[in-house]
Amino acid sequence: MRPILLLPLLLAAAACSGHTVTTVRFDLASLVPAANQSGSLSLTNATLYLPDDDGDNLYGNDLNGVALNLPRLDLIEAARLKVRLNLTNTGSAPASISVEAHVAPSDDNNIYDGSSDYTVLTGSVNLAPGESKSLELTALLDSNNQAQALGLIRGGAFRAGLKLSLSGDQVAYRLQEAWISASGRLFRLIPDN
């Protein structure tokens, strides 16, 4: 009876090799309260920092992002980031929106100041009055691209956040997607003969 119980475990282990890539994905948008995933900004110039977990009653002013604590994984080979926003210029003047994604060490109090943080994703869009557009940005971090930022993710404890800079009369935004994933060959110590 025991050999039959061990059969699924043996089959699963046999399927793993040094070439098996494992990916873990973290949904950063889920850390932004639903009430703050969309809104309208009616300022000439505004900057919004997401997510905001500092506990004050002002949303979007938290400069230290969100702390992520993962197991230290030196086997991580790459990380991917994706951000997607829907934007509508509801005002009467042209608008410009830029988005940046930052990662920083876990003890960084301002992950957007450029001192020890890394801007890993950036993009912008211009909107005429009444115009709507989607802004979708992706980035790959590996040994050839953003290697220092990847080193922070490999270390396990880091901070991440988004910076939205808006200029114009009135802009409505909706955060559709924001995630980071890490991939590596967790079984690379298994010989592939």
Image (spheres, rainbow, N blue to C red):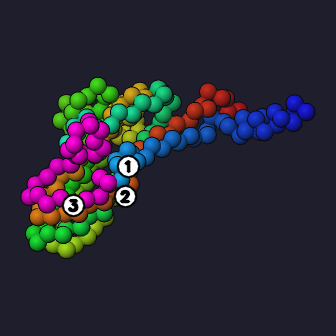
Q: Is residue 52 magenta?
A: yes
Q: Is residue 54 visible?
A: yes
- Disc on res. 139: none
- Asked where in the image residue 50 lies, by quadrant, the reply is top left
Q: Which residue is mark 1?
A: 29
The residue nearer to you, when weighing 26 against 30, is: 30
- Distance, label 3 to label 1, CA atoms, is 18 Å
Q: Could you tell me residue 31's position as x and y percent? A: 37, 44
**Residue bearing the label numbered 2:** 176
Ranked by sequence position, the earlier of labels 3 and 1 is: 1
Which amino acid is tagged 3?
Ser
Q: Are marks 3 and 1 in contact (CB under 8 Å)?
A: no
Quadrant placement of the C terminus: top right
Residue 135 visible in rendering: no
Q: Amino acid at mark 1?
A: Ala
Q: Secondary structure at mark 3?
A: strand
Bounds of the magenta segment = 35-60
Q: Is residue 89 above or below residue 190?
A: below
Q: Earlier in the sequence, mark 3 or mark 2?
A: 3
Query: Looking at the image, is mark 1 or mark 2 earlier in the sequence?
Result: 1
Nearest to the observer: residue 58 or residue 145: 58
What amino acid is labelled 2 in the image? Gln
Q: Is residue 164 found left or right of 42 in the rendered image?
A: right
Q: Residue at x 87, y 32 (%)?
A: 3
Q: Is residue 29 above or below residue 116?
A: below
Q: Are marks 1 and 2 in contact (CB under 8 Å)?
A: yes
SS at badge 2: strand
Kindly identify which residue carries mark 3.
40
Q: Residue 128's x, y, as percent?
A: 16, 71
Residue nearest the viewer, comparing 183 with 46: 46
Which residue does the image show at 43% across and 46% down from the upper left? 27
Cα gap from disc 1 to disc 2, whole angstroms: 8 Å
